[in-house]
Image (cartoon, grey):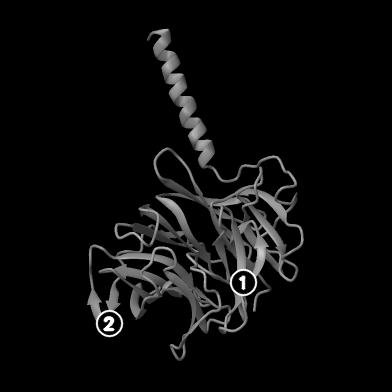
Amino acid sequence: MSTRNRLLILLVMALVAITTVTGYVLRSRDADGAGGASGVVRLDTSGQILFRDTAPGSSFGRIASVPLDRPDTPRTTGTALCDRLYAAHGTGICMQRGGPVPATHVTVLDRDLRQVRQVKTEGFPNRARVSASGSMLSWTTFVQGDSYLKDDFSTRTSILDTRTGRLISSIEQIPLTLDGKPYHAADLNYWGVNFAADDNTFYATARTGGRTYLVQGDYRKWTARTLRTNAECPSLSSDNTRIVFKKRVNASANRPWRLYVLDLATMKETPLAEEHSVDDQAAWLDDHTVMYGLPRHGGGWDVWSVPADGTGAPRLLIHDANSPAAVTAPR
């Protein structure tokens, strides 16, 4: 083998190694003051809001935290880098883009931000959720397209049972009952899975024929049924009685969605006071308040909150942040 060929092989191997390291989420950067003080972030500390730090500077993308009752205080930033994250009961999901081909590395984190398991999947990071017990994990990637406004988008949604290690890489084959009848279609997509307190019942969005549906699933029986139309990215309240979701209210590409809360007992929906279009899977700050990420004009993200009963007004919760999760004491 010639010296030139040896050099080419070594170069290719080096590029592969760099790509692999880039895709690995548990890497750190030098701390600076832009996004807050570097420190110890734990996923099991009650009374905090975990989020993705989007402040300009070297801390961009780190997992960070602030006190739940004082979110305007300086943040603490950890070392894990994520494009999307969520956590509950000492277990976290950290999603990061990686590799030259569109792919996502999904890392399961323990309370100390140590890697427990890593799964590589197609597409770009989109949605992530952890059940209240920390046992059931779900995530969604965009396999094709990058917006729910496009007709040609395609998603892949996975479920991981941490108790058994069972991984369902795609839930598209779950038997679905639509409007009371068994339903099958090649264009069926799911996203935004959110598990109830029993770690068996889950809610998600299904899309087929150009329409979206709120679906209720049964993990053990592996079945799902539609509950209503025009409901996306559901998040279940901690008391499991209500769902916050985004509803398509406008055909315009500028302001298509509005946040609503659905009472699961009465199926009554309530529009929230946030009038900006929210393209996010909102989360519950507490039993009376929801929070969500909003992009700023000119760039950047902030986390806002709004009362869950339709009253009041939105308020800025955390500047330079998105992907929030409230960590509270178990019920």
Q: Is residue 91 above or below residue 114?
A: below
| 138 left or right, relative to 133 | left
Q: Tell me what residue is drawn at x 53 percent, y 81 percent.
A: 240
Determine whether, in the image, residue 312 is placed left or right of residue 36.
left
Query: Considering the numbered disc 1 on the image, is that residue within a helix, a strand or a loop?
Result: strand
- Residue appearing at x 62%, y 52% in the figure: 54
Quadrant of the rendering where the N terminus is positioned: top left
Q: Amino acid at mark 2?
A: Asp
Quarter in which the C terminus is drawn = bottom right
- The answer to whether residue 318 is visible is yes
Q: Mark 1 or mark 2: which is in front?
A: 1
Quadrant of residue 134 within the rendered picture: bottom right
Q: Is residue 68 above or below residue 6?
A: below
Taking depth in this image into account, of 200 and 181 the one nearest to the observer is 181
63 over 288 or under it: above or below: above
- Residue under the point 23% across and 77% down: 182
Secondary structure type for disc 2: loop
User: Label 2 crowding class (10 Å Cα cut-off): few <14, some 14-19, many 20+?
Assistant: few
Residue that protrudes farthest toward the bottom in the picture? 266
Residue 179 shows which numbered tag?
2
Residue 305's disc number: 1
Percent coordinates x, y for residue 152 in the rendering: 29, 57
Q: Is residue 241 left or right of residue 12?
A: right
Residue 175 in percent (x, y) is at 29, 72
Q: 169 or 61, which lies in front?
A: 61
Q: Of marks 1 and 2, which one's residue comes earlier in the chain?
A: 2
The label on residue 152 is: none
